[in-house]
């Protein structure tokens, strides 16, 4: 992995704060770092190319926009089929996250999907669809009962 | 709750994708929506104030920045769940923390700058009062991370 310069870290720290809602937001962020807007934009584009930035954009409060049934679904998938099955599940629009994880003793689930729906019925229907599409029948639906915390990570702030 | 107009939904759908990386990103978004920069900015400020937007900004690939991440599931005595959830919340690297239905009733993600610190944090959490079991579920491969809610 390419290492990050001190300037990169300063740029990342500026970018991880709330994006300014003004005409020239990158100029505002560049000024905080103490570089020109051109240099800032160039470096942001590079961070996107290097895939260090996944996206520039917004995340909605999904409950407020109507997605009230949210579940983590843990699936037990045979390792030789995992890649294909994960691709199928990822292609579903209701799936926001799909990760292959190392299972734990007494907990043999190795594929994890986050599913967002408007109602529990709809959520269960989506999970049925995924199960039918992939043939995976051993799964656990872990509905969200309460959100205790959801925040963006603040990178490179440990020592400060 | 404010109702979302057709314009709002188009704006939010666009905003969830990619904010252009250029000098006037909101003018470019306005262009695509057939309106002007002021209209986009004013409406975004209102939608943010009304609580529809969790965060506008940059989402990084934590691994590519050199961070370690794991999903952790805890089995917590129901009487201790508040105290344990709050203790987990105090770690800056615990970015998502959810109470869920099931035997393992508290699930959180943890990002740390290195594996040693991850082990230290997890040992501290495992030893909290009321924590009866802990699963450490390390990601081997991330197939999809794309939190987008298409509004229709």
Image: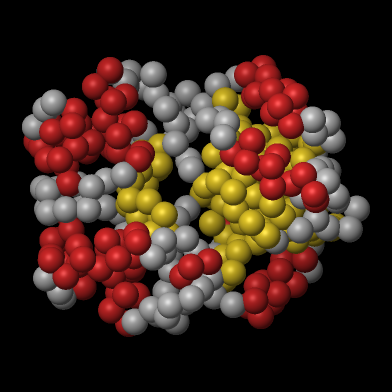
Depth check: A83 or A155 in front?
Answer: A83
Q: Is residue B138 above or below residue A81?
A: below
Point out the image quarter for the C terminus of chain B: top left
Q: Quadrant of residue A40?
A: bottom left
Q: Quadrant of residue B139?
A: bottom right
Where residue A95 sits: x, y (%)? 58, 35
- Residue at coordinates 43% horizontally, 77% vertically from top-left? A2
Query: Left or right: where does residue B38 sit relative to residue A110?
Result: left
Where residue B52 sits: x, y (%)? 36, 33
- Residue at coordinates 27% horizontally, 63% vertically from top-left? A44
- Residue at coordinates 47% horizontally, 60% vertically from top-left? B61
> Is residue B83 shown to the viewer in this render?
no
Q: Is residue B94 above or below residue B79?
A: below
Q: Is residue B87 above or below residue A5?
A: above
> Is residue A1 shown to the viewer in this render?
yes
Depth check: B28 or B90 in front?
Answer: B28
Depth check: A137 or A105 in front?
Answer: A137
Query: Left or right: where does residue B55 sit relative to residue B123?
Result: left
- Residue at coordinates 21% horizontally, 73% vertically from top-left? A33
Q: Residue furthest right?
A: A106
Q: Is residue B67 above or below residue B9?
A: below
Tell me how the rendering is colored. secondary structure
Could you tell me how many numbered marks the image carries? 0
Depth check: B127 or B7 in front?
Answer: B7
Where residue A46 sits: x, y (%)? 30, 66
Query: Left or right: where does residue B71 sit relative to residue A59?
Result: right
Q: Quadrant of residue B26?
A: top left
Where residue B31 sits: x, y (%)? 13, 33
Point out the image quarter for the N terminus of chain B: top left
């Amino acid at each position: 992995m390419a290492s990050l310069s001190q300037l990169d870290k300063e740029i990342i720290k500026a970018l991880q704060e709330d994006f300014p809602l003004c005409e020239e937001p990158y100029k505002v962020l560049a000024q905080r770092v103490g570089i020109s807007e051109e240099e800032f934009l160039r470096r942001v584009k590079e961070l996107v190319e290097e895939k260090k930035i996944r996206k520039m954009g917004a995340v909605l409060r999904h409950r407020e926009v109507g997605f009230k049934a949210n579940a983590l679904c843990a699936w037990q998938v045979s390792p030789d089929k995992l890649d294909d099955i994960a691709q199928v599940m990822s292609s579903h629009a209701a799936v926001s996250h799909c990760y292959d994880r190392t299972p734990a003793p007494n907990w043999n689930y190795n594929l994890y999907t986050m599913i967002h729906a408007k109602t529990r019925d709809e959520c269960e229907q989506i999970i049925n669809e995924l199960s039918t599409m992939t043939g995976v029948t051993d799964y656990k639906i872990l509905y969200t009962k309460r959100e205790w915390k959801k925040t963006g990570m603040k990178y490179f702030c440990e020592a400060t | 709750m404010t109702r979302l107009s057709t314009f709002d939904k188009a704006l939010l759908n666009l905003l969830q994708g990619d904010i252009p990386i250029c000098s006037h990103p909101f003018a470019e978004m306005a262009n695509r929506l057939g309106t002007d920069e002021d209209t986009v900015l004013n409406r975004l400020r209102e939608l943010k104030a009304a609580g529809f937007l969790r965060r506008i900004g940059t989402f990084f690939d934590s691994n590519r920045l050199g961070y370690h991440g794991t999903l952790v599931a805890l089995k917590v005595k129901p009487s201790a769940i508040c105290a344990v959830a709050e203790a987990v919340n105090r770690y800056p690297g615990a970015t998502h923390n959810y109470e869920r239905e099931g035997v393992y009733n508290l699930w959180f993600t943890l990002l740390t700058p290195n594996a040693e610190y991850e082990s230290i944090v997890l040992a501290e959490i495992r030893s909290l009062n009321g924590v009866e079991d802990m699963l450490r579920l390390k990601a081997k491969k991330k197939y999809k991370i794309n939190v987008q809610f298409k509004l229709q």
